[in-house]
Amino acid sequence: MNFQQIKDKDSSDRLAHKRDEFHLPSGRIYLNGNSLGPLPRSAKLRAREIVERQWGEDLVASWNTHGWIDLPFTAGEKIAALIGAGPEQVLCCDSISINLFKLLAVCLQLQTGRRVVLSQEDNFPTDLYAAHGLQQLLGENRCELKAVGADQLQQCLTEEVAVLFLTHVNFRSGKLHDMQGLTRQAHEQGILVVWDLAHSAGVLPLELDAWGVDFAVGCGYKFLNGGPGAPAFIYANRKHHDNFEQPLRGWMGHASPFDFDPGWEPAGGIAQFLTGTPSILSLATLDAALDVFDDIALGDVRQKSTELSSLFLALVESRAELQDLVLESPRDAAQRGSQLAFSHPQSYAICRALNAEGVIADFRSPDLLRVGFSPLILTYEDIWRSVEILAKVVGEESYKAGEFNRRLKVT
Amino acid sequence: MNFQQIKDKDSSDRLAHKRDEFHLPSGRIYLNGNSLGPLPRSAKLRAREIVERQWGEDLVASWNTHGWIDLPFTAGEKIAALIGAGPEQVLCCDSISINLFKLLAVCLQLQTGRRVVLSQEDNFPTDLYAAHGLQQLLGENRCELKAVGADQLQQCLTEEVAVLFLTHVNFRSGKLHDMQGLTRQAHEQGILVVWDLAHSAGVLPLELDAWGVDFAVGCGYKFLNGGPGAPAFIYANRKHHDNFEQPLRGWMGHASPFDFDPGWEPAGGIAQFLTGTPSILSLATLDAALDVFDDIALGDVRQKSTELSSLFLALVESRAELQDLVLESPRDAAQRGSQLAFSHPQSYAICRALNAEGVIADFRSPDLLRVGFSPLILTYEDIWRSVEILAKVVGEESYKAGEFNRRLKVT
C-alpha cells in the first residue's frame, strides 16, 4: 500500500469520527491501548461530575439520586452488548484476579467429584496465580491446577477436568483461541469453561450466549478505555444462576444489604458476585467510557483492527532495516487479536527509544516488542508513520544509547 | 452550654482551619461523614490531575512517572501514621470484605489445629458474610464461624479459637471495644486478632503496634474522606510477615510482576496482600485526601469529636420535644466512637425530614437515627443548629408528611 492509498483508507474510514471523542496527547502515536486505553472525553466529563458535583455537593445522597448503587449493573449491561450477552448476566466489580477466584470456586462447586482446573502455561500469569491460590487454600485433593502447552489442551479435555479457563487472546503473541470450538469440545466432556476476555472485549465481536460459554471475566481498562485499574467485569450464563454460591461474600452481594442482617442470604442472579463497596470514581468513569461504543458496530472495529495490524506487518517486512524483528504473532490476521509482537534481542531498548520518538509501544519480557491497535483512535497514517520511526530508530541504532537500556520499574 | 459559649468554642477551636480544606455544599450540615466523608480540596485537585493530565496526556507511562505502581504503599504509609503502625505494614487495596477474607484465611493457616473464627452477632454484617463465605468454601471441619453477643465474648476466648475478629466501633451504637485489653486477653489463649477499623481510622488515636494487634482492615471513605468506595486498607503486623501466604493471589502481589512468570512467588512483607490491578482513580484520590491529616494531632481530633457528640446529646436531652428519642449509644463519651444513635419509632421519616431541612443524618434499620461527627468539618454552632432543626422537625411533626415515609433504595 503506497502513501496515497493509506490516505485514502483514512478518508473512507467509517470509524474516523471516533478519534474526536478521545482526549489524545499531541505529537504521539499510541500503540498501547491494549495495556491502558486512552481517555474518552465522556469519561473525563463524568470523572469531574462524580467528584465535584455528586460527591462534593450531593454527598451520600448520591447513592440514590445519582444511581451509584446501580453502577455495577448499568456498566455491566453496556459491556453485555459488546460480548453477545443477554441482560442480567454481566456486572462490573473488583479485578480479574479476584473475579476469577470466585468463578473457579463456583465451577468446582458445580462439578462434584472433579478437581482439575485446566489452563495453559502461557496464560496471563495472574489467571494462573488465582488458581494457585485456590489450590493452596482448598488443598490438592479438592483443586489441582494443571497448566499445559497450548498444543496439549485438546487432549487434556477429559472427564477429570472440572473447568477449562483460558485467555481468549494471548497477552504476548495475540494468538486467538477458537472460543466457540473449545467451549463445545469441553462441554462434550462435561467440562465448564471460563474465558478471560482481557484483550478481546471492545475490539472483537463475541457471542457468549450463542456459544454457550459458562462464565467469563474481562478487563475494564484496555479496549474498553475505562481508566487505569478500572473495575473488571464478570459474566455468568443465566443457565447457572440458581445453582451456586460464590465464596467472596460481602454486603453488596446480599439480597437486602441495607437490612444489615447478620445472616447471609445471597442476592439473586448475577448480583451475588458483588462483594464489598465498589470504587465509584473508577466505576463511573468506566461506565461513561463505554458510551463511545453506542453508535458503532464491532464488526467494523474488528475489520479496521485487522487492517491496521496487517498494514503494520506489511510495512515492517518491506523495510530492510527491520529484518531482524521476528514476528511472534500469527501471520493470518483472523488468528490474532488486535496486537502484534516481534522478538528482537534489543527489544527493551528499541521500545524505549521508540517512546522517546513519540511512538508509545510496549515491552514484554524477555525480548518482545508489542504493539497494540486501538481502532477508535488510530489512523492508517499513524501506522505508516510509526513504522517510519521504528525503521529510523533501528536503522540508525539510536536505541543503543545507554539511557534506553536502563530498566524502569514497570515496563 | 449557652449560645455564646458555643460561639466561644468555635473561636478557640484548634481544628477550625481544617474546614476550609474541604469542598462543602452550602446550606447543609453534614452529620454523615461516618458513612461517606466529604470532599477534600486536595482530592478534588488530584482527581483532575490523575484523569486529565496523567491518564489523558501521559497515558501508560504514568505507572512509572507518576508513581501509580507505588500508590497502594504510599497511601498505606499515610494511614500507618494514623493508626500507630510502623513502616511497611499497611497497604491500600480492594474492599474490607475481600481483605477480611484474606486475613481470616491467613489466621487459619497460622493456627494449625484451630478452626473457630469468633466474632459478635452485631458486627457489621459484611464482616460476618466474609467469614460465612470462607466457612462455606473450606467446610466446617476447617472453619467454623461463631458469632456471639458482645457480653459473651470474653468467656468465649478459649483454646479452640483461631482468631477473634471484631469491629472496633459498633456501626449502629458507636460503642467502643477495648482493643488493647481484648487483644491481650486473646493472646493469652493463643488467639490471633483482626480488628476492623472502619469507624475508627482518622478519628480515634490508635496504637496497633504498641498493642500487639496482629492484623486489621479499615475503610478509606469514612473518616479518611477518600471518596465513594475508596479502596480499603490492610494492616499486617511485621511479626507475621514471613509466616503466611494469603490466598487471593494476583500479579500485583508477585515478587516480580513484570517478569510474567507462570510460577507463583509472593512479594515479601505486606506487598503480597495485593491481588489485581488497583483502581488508580479511586486510590490516588484517597492518597490525596489523606494529606489533610498532615498537620494535625489525632488527640485533638478525638477531643473535638467527644465534645461535639456530648454537646449534641446534652442539647437533645434539654429539649422537651425530643424526649421520645432514646439514646442507644454509650452515655460516657470515652466509651463511644464519633457518632450517636437514637431509636424512635419514626426514625426513618425523621431522618428524611431532617435531610430535607439541610441536616444530613443517617437511618439504620430498624429504627435508628444515626448522627456522625467529622471533627475536621463541623463547628460547634453546626451542632447547635442541627439540634434546633431536629427539635423543629419532631416538635412540629413535619416528618409525618407522606413523602418522608416512602422508602428509598439506599437509606
Image: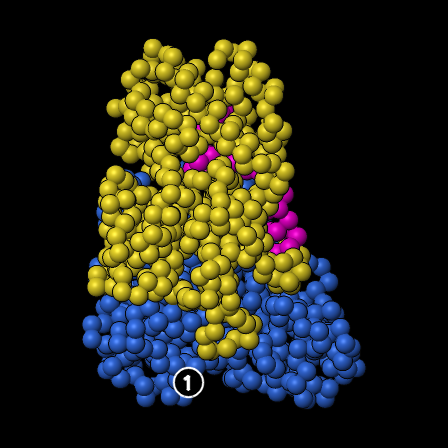
Chain colours: A yellow, B blue
| Numbered circles on residues, count | 1
Residue nearest the viewer, comparing B362 with B74: B362
Coordinates of residue A174 in the picture (x, y in percent):
37, 34
Answer whether residue B192 is visible to the viewer in this image.
Answer: no
Q: Which residues are magenta?
A: A28-55
In the picture shown, does residue A126 fall above or below B218?
A: above
Q: Is residue B165 left or right of residue A239?
A: left
Coordinates of residue B10 in the picture (x, y in percent):
64, 68
Based on the picture, tell me whether residue A89 belongs to the magenta stretch. Answer: no
Q: Quadrant of residue A405?
A: top left
For the point 36% across and 52% down, the residue is A187
For the point 68% across and 89% down, the residue is B323
In the picture shown, does residue B102 fall above or below A6?
A: below
Badge 1 marks a residue whose secondary structure is helix
Amino acid type, mark 1: Ala
Q: Is residue A151 left or right of residue A233?
A: left
For the point 26% across and 76% down, the residue is B141
Q: Quadrant of the N terminus of chain B?
A: bottom right
Q: Is residue B300 left or right of residue A101?
A: right
Answer whether residue A85 is visible to the viewer in this image.
Answer: yes
Label 1 belongs to which residue? B150
Q: Quadrant of the C terminus of chain B?
A: bottom right
Mark 1 nearby-residue class (10 Å; few <14, some 14–19, many ≥20)? some
Based on the picture, tell me whether residue A49 belongs to the magenta stretch. Answer: yes
For the point 62% across and 41% down, the residue is A294
Coordinates of residue A104 in the picture (x, y in percent):
35, 57
Q: Quadrant of residue B236?
A: bottom left
Q: Chain letter of disc 1?
A: B
